[in-house]
Image (cartoon, rainbow, N blue to C red):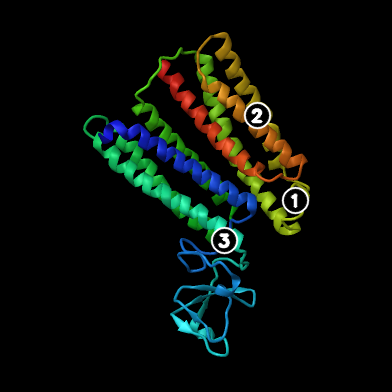
Amino acid sequence: MMKNRFPQIVQVAIISVYLIFLAGAVVRMTGSGMGCPDWPKCFGYYIPPTSESQITWQPNATFKKGVIIIKDEALFVAQKTLKTGAAFNLDNWQPYTKHTYNVFNKYHTWTEYINRLASVLSGFVFLFLVFAASKFWSTDKRIPVLAYIAFALMLFEAWLGKTVVDTNLKPTIITIHMVVGLIIIGLLLRLQFITSTKKKVYKYNALFSKLLIVSVLFSLVQIAMGTQVRQFIDEQVKLFGFENKQYSLLNPSFKFYFHRSFTILIVLVNFGLFYLNQIKNLGYKLVNWILLLLFLETITGILMYYASFPIGTQAVHLLSGAVLFGLQYYLLLQSRSAK
């Protein structure tokens, strides 16, 4: 019974990962990446605080062990459950030195917390996926092996999530975090393809297949570069304030111009796929969806640059890129199976 339902389980796992991408995109869009200064808890709470008074030192107040407070523009961790006196006693508190970010914004905190909840939910889905995949060990070892690798990478992603917070959103770590997420999507799509009960026979074309490989690699490069551009934007937001989005791309680095210009090459490659699919009558329907996502990517990119980041465009831009990569990779699986 579980074997018959396995393709649906894989689909749920894919959706759960894309939900993490969406939640992460909203976090980046709203500047909420440091909404929680610690991980996996948030200011030392399993359920985040809703007001600044909960994490501000006060006389005659009770604080549980591990709670993080803000005092004199610095973070401190309670060494034990305590009730404060009339004066702040440093013996009861340890400075939180992993980073110096010491701002509380309840909207940022809860946005980041919801992002973490999406990751936890996905983790449970992956546990179920691994359990279901193990049923195939005697018939097709590829299935459990792919599931185990995907689950191991999810654990690695969880550790990376902690590292992202501890390093105050270090650009390199964020890029690795994003790329590993795409690798997980690729593994799940491979599982989906292997276990799919509705397999269509496609026509093979060598040039089409080679262009597909190029398009997948180009998308990986573009997404990785996009995370670097996004980090530059975050730094600009810190410098000029969230309300001055028109300065987000003031004097951008070479990475931005590369990211923008590289889009032209990506569009040309994918239009080449569309052209070959049409004139050779290959029958790959995913090509049309890829062009639609490329259109969304391009439009949202233009809006962000020329219209000062309208609300939602950043989230759509990131999610479209992740879905685009997934469709291109699945199309590559279809093409290779035709060979």
Residue 225 appears in the rendering:
no
Residue 245: mark: 1
> In the rendering, which numbered label is found on residue 186?
none
Q: Residues within 10 Å of mark 3 (few under 14, many from 20)?
A: many
**Residue 49 in the image, given as x and y percentages of width and height:** 53, 67
Q: Which mark is residue 295?
A: 2
Q: Position of residue 116 (x, y in %)?
A: 48, 54
Quote the CA–CA distance across marks 1 and 2: 24 Å
Q: Secondary structure at mark 3?
A: helix
- The circle drawn on residue 109 is 3
Q: Residue at x 27, y 30 (%)?
A: 140
Question: Is residue 226 rendered to the left or right of residue 141?
Answer: right
Residue at the farthest bottom position: 86
Residue depicted at x 58% and y 54%: 170
Mark toward the viewer: 1 or 3: 3
Sequence-first tag of 1 and 3: 3
Q: Where 262 falls versus 242 (above or below)?
A: above
Q: Quadrant of residue 241?
A: bottom right
In the drawing, does residue 152 fall left or right of residue 236? left
The amino acid at mark 3 is: Thr
